[in-house]
Image (spheres, grey):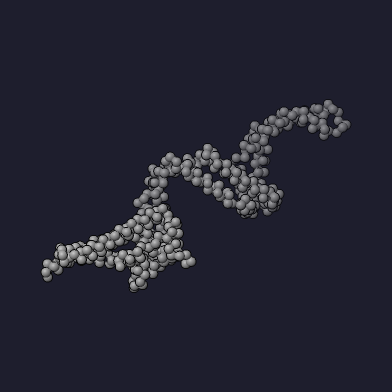
Amino acid sequence: MQVNSEPTTQPEAPTAGPREPSRPAQVRPAVAHRQLSAGDAEKAAALRRMKLLALSLLIAMAVVFVFAFALQKQYPWLEYVRAAAEGGMVGALADWFAVTALFKYPMGLKIPHTAIIPRRKDQIGASLGEFVETNFLSEQVVQEKLASLNIAGRAGQWLSGPGGAERVAKEGAAVIRGAFKVLNDDDVQAVIEGMVRKHLLTPPWGPPVGRMAERIFAEGHHHTLIDLLVDRAADWVAANHETVSRLVTDRSPQWVPGFVDGLVGDKVYVELLKFTRAVQTDPQHQVRLSIDKYLTDLAQDLQHDPAMIARAEGIKAQVLGDPEVRELASRTWATIKNALLTAVDDPESELTVKFKAAVRDFGARLVNDDELAGKVNAWIGDAAGYLVRTYRSDIAGVITDTVARWDAEETSQKIELQVGKDLQFIRINGTVVGSLAGLAIFTVAHLTFG
């Protein structure tokens, strides 16, 4: 009986999915076996070997029991062998029943409190999820573990070491290329156009431009530009005597004699040259002071004069109309996109080289600067603590929901595949312990009662 019942304790090869009702039962193991991973296939083979070993011990005990029972009257010492074999069979059968009851009904009999895992699959999953949530997804546990790992120091060593910065740059380049493939150019241009309108066109230009100009003029930064203009004017006048004379002649009445035009032209040229030289050499010249006053008044008007502010808005509307804004957004996005793609595709580009240098420098600082490393570790711990505190139930719920989706038979097979080999040692130990117990009990009884 023991031999015939034993195969019922050996589950077919675990399946990766639930039983297909229309498929004969004897076909399932072959189909499921093909779906096993290499590691699971190795575990299944080890489980079969252990089951065969446990069954072999049971059969050996049965054979020994039969021979000892038949010959014990002829050879009295075989009574001890019979008692040991009898105890071994009892222990083997009892532990076989206990192990089998975890995963299925022994011999197909629906005995109460058997097939525990298939029947209580959902409760087991919920309990496992609660256990993980309580004991592993604790904010204190996670933070203490992260603090002991010194993530900042390890990351710094990797970033500052050979290949770390290159790997970060490579992955960053892949992210940038992927982002540009996903992003729609029209959508990005629309965003840029909206930002230009919101931050550049909607605010009035007059007051901010006036405030900036007032600060520039008050600090005298415009004098350099005025000097440049005056120098260019003086140089032009000095180099264009004939041009000035011709301008005077062209505007002179026709009845004026030519030599008079020449004298007047020379006089105008000389006076104009003196005037430009004076403006050029005298920082306090009246022309310079007048320009300063004009620019200062202009800066005040841009801030406070409604008419000047309206004129500035009109200029803005002329310079940046709808077509110009759209073209500006298009050119801006195209320039940024092309520049980044070119830079990330070239490992020797200035952007890539500087990025790698920055990554190495940051890694070195994480290694050498204890204060910075402490801040980074604290930030990582706080972030992990927040995630655990906020989403611990959702994370643990993955276990509960996953187990709930499993088929009952599949769940039993999965668990048996992982722990079944070790459970077979219970059967082997039960056989050995049962034999020793049977021998001990018989010996004590024989010595006591004869």
Residue 103 visible to an observer of this rendering: yes
Residue 278 image position (x, y, % from top left) = 67, 32
Label count reads: 0
- Residue 385 in the image: x percent, y percent? 40, 58
Q: Residue at x 45, y 59 (%)?
A: 31
Left or right of 422 on screen, residue 385: right
Q: Is residue 395 toward the left or the right of residue 272 in the image?
A: left
Give whichever of 242, 439 is nearer the camera. Answer: 439
Question: Which residue is located at x 20 percent, y 64 percent?
Answer: 68
Give how far across and how far down residue 352 sits, in percent: 52, 41
- Name the residue: 42% across, 60% down: 29
Q: Is residue 210 visible?
A: no
Given residues 60 and 285, the one toward you in this image is 60
Q: Residue furthest top?
A: 259
Q: Nearer the viewer, residue 34 or 164?
A: 34
Percent position (x, y) of residue 206? 65, 50
**Is residue 27 toward the left or the right of residue 73 in the image?**
right
Task: Identify which residue is drawn at 36% across, 54% down.
Answer: 145
From what the image shows, is residue 96 above or below residue 379? below
Q: Quadrant of residue 159?
A: top left
Q: Quadrant of residue 70?
A: bottom left
Q: Residue furthest right?
A: 255
* Position of 404 relative to 334 (above/below): below
Query: Quadrant of the image for the C terminus?
Result: bottom left
In this view, the residue in front, 192 or 73, is: 73
Quarter of the image that includes the N terminus: bottom left
Residue found at the very far front of the displayed protein: 74
